[in-house]
């Protein structure tokens, strides 16, 4: 039965990760090999001419290779050195390939089988243990797998023994996995590693793999015995908890900044109101004209304070998860209504409608009207008298696209990334004449409305040239 690999890149990673000479031989005579293979066979495709073996073994090897089925191991000699050549069949991108692994033979006395591996009681316990138990030999080849492992991968023992299980390792983890195994063998040290391996249902899941050294009766090193445990759910939960903690920290910091900014913004109009009222109380003989100016200043700051409190309450409701109403509406009519209101306020500006396609969707009519007013009001505030404010509404597939463009002072590139931050306002030194005011909460509210409708909002601006705000809303209709 063949091992299945998903792509050439996965196969290349697997071959390069092998600690032994290894190559993939394709039916089209193509070959992938690692650096260890090249040391023995400088011309990779001519490998069969560089090995020596009996005619019977060569015939068996070539028969399996050309049939791309089953597994075979034959003793060979390469440049006078004794070795074993292992052949396993693979499927790569749906095409048959042969995996060749050259294992040099050592001059040591044959190692006695591990008493543990041969113990029937151990095999019975290992097969039904609640973890995946494995054993490996001196060449890092897997020599034993219990039933839990086979049930987990959904493959046969022949497929996963030897080096077959490498095909199940996630491509991103294959190199580190092979490096950890090689280091454990080189240093003969116990090891522990985490990697992703494909389960029987095709899902890559996180495992923790712990290996312990095995020794024979005479104290000789035999390889490793270890166990794999599925920790995917634990890692997923840990990641979710870390993400939740990060969001809570960000929310806490956001609330702290909001409280500090709100206190600062509220203090300014309150200070102005209190100062002006103190003047009226302390100086009874102030001329009527000055009294009138003071009262107008108080009224102006009180209006600003009212807008600020209103905007803060609206954002607070949004932060608390307050939802939007869902109405069947004509977006073009909602925008046109807001446009006419702002047009009456901006009698010194040129208000134009470029396009206004009739678009129906499900949304909150009041909030969408507020969105249009925020964008048009911003355009009006920051555009000098005589400038142009333009509204457009078009349809692009299943998306409604609203654009508000002006010929105002524009926004610098350094300020542009921060325009949706609460209470953020650009450097007032660039304003022409009087500060246009504002609470610094308009665009944050606009983004909240757009997000609530599942849309996107973007700004394009150039200092001294004007600003264009684009809102893209999905067109959702009732079934």
Image (cartoon, rainbow, N blue to C red):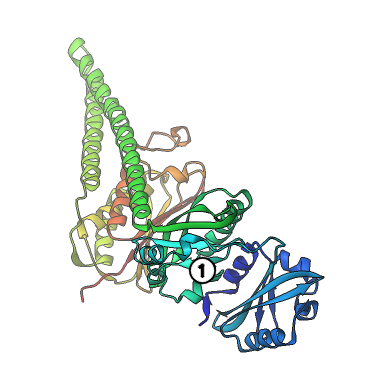
Tell me residue 229's x, y (percent).
Answer: 39, 57
Horizontally, is 166 left or right of 133 in the view?
right
**The quadrant where residue 330 appears:** bottom left
Q: Position of residue 106 (x, y in %)?
A: 70, 63
Q: Residue furthest front?
A: 218
Residue at left offset 33%, top offset 71%: 357
* Residue nearer the viewer, 176 or 238: 176
Using residue 230 as the reference point, say whether residue 338 is left or right of it.
left
Q: Callout 1: few (<14), some (14-19), or many (20+) C-alpha neighbours within 10 Å?
A: some
Q: Residue at x 22, y 20 (%)?
A: 274
Q: Is residue 119 above or below residue 465?
A: below
Residue toward you, 467 or 63: 63
Q: Is residue 440 visible to us here?
A: no
Q: Is residue 379 visible?
A: yes
**Image point (35%, 72%), residue name:** 398
Q: Is residue 368 above or below residue 273?
A: below
* Residue receiving disc 1: 165
């Amino acid at each position: 039965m063949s091992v299945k690999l998903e792509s050439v890149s996965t196969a290349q990673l697997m071959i390069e990760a092998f600690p032994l000479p290894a190559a993939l031989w394709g039916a089209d005579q193509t070959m992938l090999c690692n650096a260890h293979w090249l040391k023995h066979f400088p011309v990779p495709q001519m490998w069969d001419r560089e090995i020596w073996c009996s005619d019977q073994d060569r015939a068996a090897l070539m028969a399996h290779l050309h049939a791309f089925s089953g597994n075979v191991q034959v003793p060979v000699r390469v440049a006078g050195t004794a070795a074993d050549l292992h052949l396993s069949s693979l499927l790569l991108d749906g095409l048959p390939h042969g995996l060749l692994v050259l294992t040099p033979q050592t001059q040591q006395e044959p190692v006695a089988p591990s008493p543990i591996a041969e113990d029937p009681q151990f095999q019975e316990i290992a097969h039904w243990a609640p973890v995946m138990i494995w054993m490996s030999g001196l060449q890092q080849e897997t020599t034993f797998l219990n039933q839990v492992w086979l049930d987990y991968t959904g493959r046969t023992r022949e497929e996963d023994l030897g080096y077959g299980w490498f095909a199940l390792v996630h491509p991103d983890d294959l190199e580190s996995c092979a490096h950890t195994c090689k280091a454990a063998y080189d240093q003969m040290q116990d090891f522990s590693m985490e990697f992703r391996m494909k389960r029987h249902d095709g899902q890559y899941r996180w495992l923790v793999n712990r290996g312990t050294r095995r020794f024979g009766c005479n104290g000789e090193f035999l390889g490793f015995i270890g166990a794999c445990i599925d920790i995917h759910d634990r890692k997923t939960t840990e990641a979710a908890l870390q993400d939740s903690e990060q969001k809570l920290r960000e929310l806490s910091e956001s609330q702290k900044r909001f409280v500090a900014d709100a206190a600062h913004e509220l203090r300014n109009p309150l200070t102005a109101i209190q100062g002006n009222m103190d003047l009226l109380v302390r100086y009874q003989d102030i001329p009527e004209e000055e009294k009138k100016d003071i009262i107008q200043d108080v009224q102006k700051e009180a209006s600003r304070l009212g807008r600020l409190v209103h905007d803060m309450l609206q954002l607070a409701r949004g932060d608390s998860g307050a939802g939007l109403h869902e109405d069947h509406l004509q977006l073009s009519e909602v925008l046109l209504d807001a446009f006419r209101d702002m047009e009456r306020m901006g009698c010194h500006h040129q208000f134009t409608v470029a396009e206004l396609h009739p678009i129906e969707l499900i949304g909150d009519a009041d909030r969408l009207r507020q969105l249009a007013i925020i964008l048009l009001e911003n355009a009006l505030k920051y555009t000098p008298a005589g400038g142009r404010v333009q509204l457009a509404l078009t349809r692009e597939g299943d998306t409604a696209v609203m654009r508000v463009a002006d010929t105002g002072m524009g926004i610098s590139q350094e300020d542009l990334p921060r325009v949706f931050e609460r209470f953020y306002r650009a450097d007032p030194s660039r304003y022409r004449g009087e500060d246009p005011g504002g609470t610094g909460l308009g665009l944050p509210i606009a983004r909240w409305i757009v997000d609530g409708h599942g849309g996107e909002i973007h700004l394009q601006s150039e200092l001294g040239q004007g600003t264009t705000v684009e809102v893209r809303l999905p067109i959702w209709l009732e079934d």
